[in-house]
Amino acid sequence: MINVRNIDCLEGLKSIESDSVDCVVTSPPYNKCTQNQKTGNQIWKGFKIDYDQYQDNKTDEEYATWMLEVLEECHRIIKPNGSVFFNHKVVLRNCQGHFPQWVLNDGLKLYQMIVWNRMCSSNMRSETLYPTYELIFWLVKGKPKVFKSQAKHKNDIWDILPDRDNQHPAPFPYELAENCVKLVCEKGSQSLIVDPFSGSG
């Protein structure tokens, strides 16, 4: 059963019982601060992302504080052997790469870092190398349940094309989320999976 609640992500997370979730799989807005920038060097029609009422342009400090609050709630709700798969990227802004180092400051332990090889680039700037990867931080409380034989991608680099046939401007590939779930949720079990940033669902 899938339950979609259209509320603030922190409000939703705080309503979930502690130590009750098997797996969190999510990808938040990246705080790219690009609402007013030109789109001429981009090849995707959805680069100028419209999140309706949400503006992806917080200060770095505001954004880090928000993400840490989200991760602290994820930490609270997962079971002792649960997992959080948190997708983010190194955002290039003002000629500087912004690595999401706050991911490692919330109390969750880094179990592994996975590279999502998108095998294409949405950014064709002449002054930088084409960005073709994003990161998935596999975060845990303790030793997680792992069912590697169930997963399609069994190494730490996942070659998965982005989902382009989607009305959402930045869709999360179904195959990527599916691989995360299969890694840590035994087939046939009644696992509870949470995505606080459901995007296109």
Image: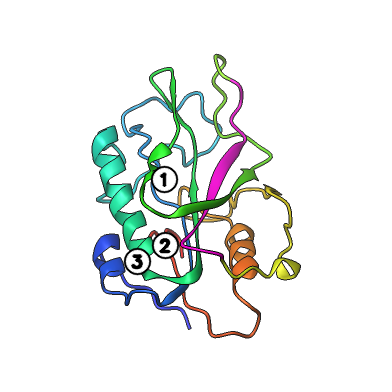
Instruction: Give the mark nearer the N terminus: 2 vs 1.
Output: 1
Instruction: Give the mark nearer the N terminus: 3 vs 1.
Output: 3
19 sits to left or right of 9? right
Q: Which residue is mark 1?
A: 103
Q: Which residue is mark 3?
A: 76
Q: Is residue 166 magenta?
A: no
* Kind of residue at badge 3: Arg
* Kind of residue at badge 2: Ser
CA separation in Å, label 2 and label 1: 19 Å
Instruction: Give the mark nearer the N terminus: 2 vs 3.
Output: 3
Q: Is residue 17 above or below residue 114?
A: below
* Kind of residue at badge 1: Val
139 sits to left or right of 49? right
Count of all numbered marks drawn on residues in the image: 3
| Mark 3 and mark 1 residues within 8 Å of each other at the beta carbon | no
Q: Which residue is mark 2?
A: 198
